[in-house]
Image (tube, coloured by chain):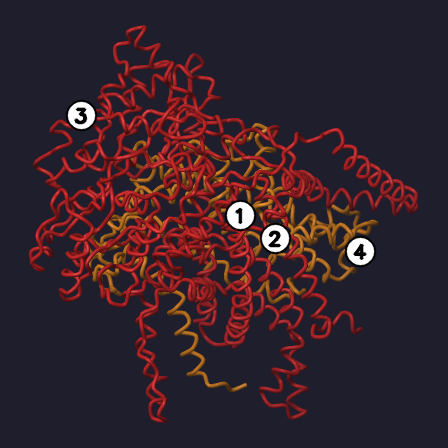
Amino acid sequence: MKPNRLFLYFALSLGSALMLFPLWWMFVVSLSTPEDASAAATTSAGGALKLWPKNWLFSNYPQALAKMGSGTPWFGFLDAASNTILITALCVLGQVLSCSLVGFGFARMRFRGRDGLFLLMISTMMLPAQVTMIPLFILFRTFGWIDTILPLVVPMFFGTPFYIFMFRQFFAQIPEALVEAARLDGCGALGVWWRIMLPICRPVIAITAVFTFVFVWNDFLGPLIYLHSEEQMTLAVALNSFKNQYGDFRDAHLLMAASIVTMLPCIVLFFVAQRQFVGGLSLGAVKG
Amino acid sequence: MHSFWTGLALAGRWLVGSIAVALFLAAIGWIGHRALYRTGVAADQIQLTVVHWGDDDEDKIVAALVSDFEKENPDIRVKRVNPGQAAAVNTKLQTMFASGDPPDVMQLGYEKVADWGSKDLLLDLEPLLAADSAAKVPNALNLADFFEPVINCFRYDGKRVGRGALVGIAKDFTTAGFYYNKDLFRKAGVEFPKDDWTWDDFIAAARKIARLDGCYGAEFVTWEAMVRLYIWTEGVDFANEDFSEFRLKDPQLIGTLARLRSWFHDPAEVRTFFSAKTQLETGEDLFLSGRVGMSGPLGRWKVPTFRLIKDFDWDFAPLPRGKTQANGIFTSAWAIAKDSPHHDASWRLVRYLCGKRGQELSCGPGLAIPTMRTVAESELFIDPAQKPERDDAYLAMVPVARTIDWPSDPRYLHTLRTILETLLKTGALSAGDAMARVDRDWSAIRADQPVATPIAWGRLGLWLGLPTLAALALGFAAWWRGRPGKHAFAEERAGLLVISPWLIGFILFTAFPVLMSLLLAFCDWSGLNTIDKARWVGFANFTAMFKNETFRKALGVTAIYVLFAVPVGQLAAIGAALLMNHELKGIGFFRSAWYLPSVLAGVGMAVLWKWVFDDQSGLLNEFIRILSPLISTPLSWVGISLPTFQNIGWLEKDAERYAVAAFVIIGLWSIGGGMMIYLAGLKGIPQELYEAASIDGAVAWRRFTNVTLPMLSPVIFFNVIIAIIASFQVFTQAYVMTGGGPGDATRFYVVYLYNAAFDFHQMGFASAMAWMLLLIVLALTVLVMWGSKRFVYYEALKS
């Protein structure tokens, strides 16, 4: 293997630049003065594309965050951030536990109807979310869950087909001898899952956790529909309200600052988990 | 050295981990503190929910009013919900009404009066007004203090807007006209608009200003309401007063519209008009740049923005006249839900919001005209210290301003909007053809009155329930009879127990909603009242679907998108994965960088893409312009000359041809997910295969076609299916960026489905569409599966 390294680096860097450029642009705008920001956002107004911040106005950040929500300064942001963190943490926990358990069941337990049920589960992946949106709302309302975090969190404890599928593929590859050994040591099904399976499937757990984190963190429609009061809002919804309140090009710098703060956890998490992630996928966890 | 870096990475991970834990604990602490200490609603207090929209300035006004109201009325607590833009408000209201839990007070736009009024959701406020004046309430509202035409915008008698029950009290309003750049007028030597200027004066001024270097004559807003004002000035309209009779074949109407279209698209009109788009969502405003002479028809709401202009002088002029002078009233009101349990408290709130103090506050930012005459005619509104100078021009139009009424079925308005966009923005239709199409669509909507009967629950239950029960019983019996020995049976029970979370979740959160939506697909239900109001219509929703031109267009646009997005996206992802499959230093960084965009979602992205695809100075057009000589120069050597590159209006005037391409390009930006999965597949190919191939003398390309591709084929198969499913459901970007327009150019399937559910209140039709989508995707998946048998190589099946 001796590909032209220079060319490879060139292609990789060019691609990275294209991919990261928008993010950088947001960052530059977020540090600008209101005048520069509106010039950058109103391109046809002759605004030039600025690649380097003229001023490093980090004060835009506290200013933007303090303005979130409509009550006491900072409360809107602190409420939204806390809610989002709590919801996301619970969702990740629920998703990892339920999907690994169910995936384990489909991979390693023997019962009649297993393959049929598995096929059923796979086919539900094709269902557009729009089909179930309104009926689900009615259901959660009968439970009295509206304006609580329950409609967002509880379903996560019942598994999601995509991740169950991934766990199942992974578990199916684990040598039977390992499971037998545990059984002989007196482990029940739950024991095997908890003591043997979970510890060795860390890559899949990482993928599930990261994907779930990103999805829940960015989810807009769910919180919009199920949460009413401002106290309960998540960051995605708060950011959208923020956009509508400050979406005018006049406040582009504030909008970008708020957007970046909202995206930051996803970016950090991604860079930290990146190794696990790539390693996990390469274990063949998702082979059709 | 190595251990140093590993140590650093470990330390970094620990740091991030501890910060995460600390943040989590802090979040719990904050929420706990909030639950314990922030004042909630006391037992003897009434809680009112208010849904409204508005930007920061408006939000602050409502917040201030509400907080004062709470001080004066300690027995009432008000919960404000401001989801921001009107679309979010609609989704919000829809779910609240559908669940039987409507807000007590809500902001109602003038264009929704017939729609909401006809659903019988709003309380008639007239009796409350009468009761107040009878009881001599000190701060009672007196309608005589208000502008009468504005108040009448919120009357609805079951057929027409403008008379009948009062469903809301107008909070503020505006009429429309043109903002003009005085400096450009002087520079071009054009007289300032007079109060009775005509369209001829208008277009003459625009043409003169267009001759100035780099300037545009005018920016003409093509919203349907503005176009309606324009045709009113020529004494024509789309239909008669109550929309029972359409006048779309009227040659005078067609001529008037053709004139407007020619100002946009006639080749002789060089820069007379700038793009028809001046909406806030583009985040840009050409008028502000000082390069456009006039901007309109627009209302008062532009004033706060324009007041920031420092570089040139500007003012407001009334709408030009044609055969006659005309104008319309743009307004919103406070309304009370009929189903609210707190009519009295809600009315006290509305009375306060519409009262004198509220009216005076709303003058502050300058974005609307108070509906109370005394306030509007006071110095508070007509503020000589503030621009525009001609505050009185808005008020002078009130006598000729009419209620901009639309039929109660929102589909009329929607159809008109998209066709007008096609007529004026993209110019793809002539005025005659456009009106003929409106006529067809409107007639189809009028004829679409399916026979609705109450749902025969008993019969339905019998037909569906009995077979289901029988099947379940049979299945269970078969399962029970075939149960294996005691030991195996224990394992079986354990297995079912282990998968039970999914099983329960499936029944509750998938099977039940799916069956319910299947039922809805055969029903007519607005989604604005509780589901027991649904009516059975049989297959009417499905037959209506295929007769519906917009549906066919949406399906077509989506199919084209899938046809391009899936192969292009998958090829790019495979290419990226091949690049990433080299063990280079820093490859982790590159992988992360390429993947990162897939992790990000958000409003910032939409703003950004708008800017990339901008037709005047967007990044993409610049890029193509720079690169185009690379192709055209070599061709010119061999005698082929290509036309010089013209700016492409990706999402605007050339949207019919290029909008789908734009979305395919956007999709390329998030190939990271597919790339990662392909990379995993590449990593899974045993190295020995490559070695064996090399020994056999295979060159790189042969190794790729004979080893990589076959070994990767299951992953390709998996990704293609996922991509097809995802591409058919493309929604968020289109919804946020273009809202389906211009015309129907980007009205993807799910966008239209969303329109049907939340804009047209046709839950049944939307459910039918969702089911149709499911069938289409299912059929395609089966097709791909069947077609792939020859190409997909399964290691497991060979052994």
Spot occupied by residue B403 in the image (x, y as percentages of width and height): 32, 34
- Comes first in the chain, label 1 or label 3: 3
Query: Picture quarter containing residue B36?
Result: top left
Image position of B440 (left or right of A198): left
Image position of B161 (left or right of B728): left
Q: Which residue is mark 3?
A: B375
Spot occupied by residue B20 in the image (x, y as percentages of width and height): 45, 47
Chain bearing mark 3: B
Q: Quadrant of the N terminus of chain A?
A: bottom right
Q: Which residue is mark 1?
A: B753
Relative to the observer, which residue lies in front, A288 or B591? A288
- Comes first in the chain, label 1 or label 2: 1
Chain bearing mark 2: B
* Residue type at the position of mark 3: Val
Q: Measure the C-alpha gap from mark 3 to mark 2.
A: 54 Å
* Disc 2 and disc 4 in contact, CB within 8 angstroms: no
